[in-house]
Image (tube, rainbow, N blue to C red):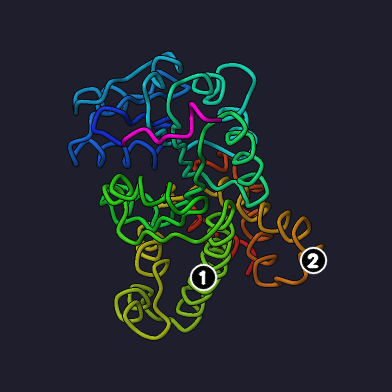
């Protein structure tokens, strides 16, 4: 690996970003605001945000290899673990197939939630191809992505982390190196457990307020700064009051992440879902809403759990 062992400097002209969904596009805009010249790619070229990114100064590429050409750092914000694995390490039309023969050791940073086992598998495959990998899942929702206040949890080599840290600081506020490959993913799954169980408490507080004939707005306005306050109450509680169930983080993605929680328990320690009863309950409530909804699960955010309470409790 001698010819690929040296790092490519992270300059303002060497950053590519794959995946321009709600989160990825907002993060890309913040890189542009910080002065970085950025190339972006999205599987669907019909998204209006691509035109907005082009107007903001991004180079929008329809061809993946063109987007990756010359990249020292590649950011990705994609779908589930299979999507990420295929796009990063597939035999054709992947980051690995496009960059394995390139000079220099590019750093690939994935912001998706894919679980620790998949992160370690991707790291090994990219390492074998002369590339570096950091798993860097994020939390903070669409608000954090737009305002560059995301929490970013990073696993991988610490020297790779230090090299891309200035770029990460353009997109997040609380950025933490967590350990070896997969460590960022492990912490993100802990975060998803907190988010899922917190949503139960928000929905139950609103339900109790209704039962006691109390204005539910008081639950948000007064209690968000008290001992029972949470990000979910302050941000998603307001959306529930407005009957706004559009996704800041989609129901489909939360169900995927909770599946990863339970899959990881079995893979890492052979522990069943009963070890996390609160998480299992939240997963069942999210699934109930998804199963009973006419619209697709990605049409709703996690605050749509309130529907389960309104229809069955």
Image height of 235 relative to 248, above or below: below
Q: Position of residue 172 (x, y in %)?
A: 32, 53
Numbered label tally: 2
The vertical placement of 159 against 96, above or below, is: below
- Are the two marked residues, 1 and 2, in contact with CB atoms closer than 8 angstroms? no
- Return the x and y of residue 240 as percentages of the image width and height: 41, 61
Among the two numbered marks 1 and 2 on one chain, the one whose residue lies closer to the N terminus: 1
Quadrant (top left/top right/bottom left/bottom right) for the C terminus: bottom right
Q: Nearer the viewer, residue 246 or 243?
A: 246
Assess whether residue 3 is covered by the magenta stretch: yes
Magenta stretch, residue numbers = 1-9
The answer to whether 204 is drawn above or below residue 35 in the figure is below
Q: Which mark is residue 143?
A: none
| Residue nearer the viewer, 280 or 269 | 269
Residue depicted at 35% across the width and 73% down the height: 220
Please, is residue 201 above or below residue 177 in the view?
below
Residue at position x 36%, y 77% in the image? 215
Quarter the N terminus occupies: top right
User: Which numbered disc covers residue 271?
Assistant: 2
- Packing grade of label 1 (10 A; few <14, some 14-19, many >=20) is many
Q: Residue 60 location, x and y as percent? A: 32, 20
Q: Is residue 72 magenta?
A: no
Residue 198 vs residue 213: left or right?
Answer: right
Measure how far apart labels 1 and 2 are at the Cα level: 23 Å
Residue occupied by mark 1: 198
Q: Secondary structure at mark 1?
A: helix
**Quarter of image, res 149:** bottom left
Mark 2: secondary structure: loop
> What secondary structure characterizes most of the magenta part?
loop
């Amino acid at each position: 690996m001698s010819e690929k062992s040296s790092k490519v400097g992270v300059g303002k002209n060497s950053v590519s970003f794959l995946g321009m969904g709600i989160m990825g596009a907002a993060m890309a805009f913040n890189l542009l605001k910080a002065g970085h010249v950025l190339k972006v790619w999205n599987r669907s070229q019909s998204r209006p945000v691509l035109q907005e990114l082009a107007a903001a100064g991004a180079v929008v590429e329809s061809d993946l290899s063109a987007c990756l050409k010359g990249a020292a750092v590649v950011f990705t914000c994609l779908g589930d673990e299979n999507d990420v694995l295929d796009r990063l390490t597939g035999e054709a039309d992947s980051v690995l197939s496009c960059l394995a023969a390139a000079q220099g050791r590019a750093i690939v940073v994935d912001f998706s939630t894919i679980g620790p086992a998949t992160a370690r598998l991707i790291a090994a495959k990219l390492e074998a191809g002369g590339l570096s990998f950091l798993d860097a899942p994020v939390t903070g929702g669409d608000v954090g992505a737009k305002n560059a206040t995301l929490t970013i949890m990073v696993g991988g080599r610490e020297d790779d982390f230090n090299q891309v840290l200035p770029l990460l600081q353009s997109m997040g506020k609380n950025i933490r190196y967590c350990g070896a490959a997969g460590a960022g993913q492990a912490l993100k799954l802990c975060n998803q457990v907190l988010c899922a169980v917190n949503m139960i408490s928000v929905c139950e507080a609103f339900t109790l307020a209704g039962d006691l004939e109390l204005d539910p707005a008081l639950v948000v306005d007064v209690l968000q700064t008290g001992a029972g306050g949470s990000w979910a109450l302050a941000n998603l509680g307001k959306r529930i009051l407005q009957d706004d169930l559009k996704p800041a983080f989609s129901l489909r993605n939360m169900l995927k992440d909770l599946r990863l929680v339970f899959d990881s328990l079995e893979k890492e320690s052979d522990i069943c879902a009963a070890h996390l009863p609160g998480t299992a309950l939240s997963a069942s409530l999210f699934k109930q809403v998804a199963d009973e909804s006419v619209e697709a699960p990605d049409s709703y955010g996690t605050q749509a759990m309130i529907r389960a309470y309104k229809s069955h409790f």
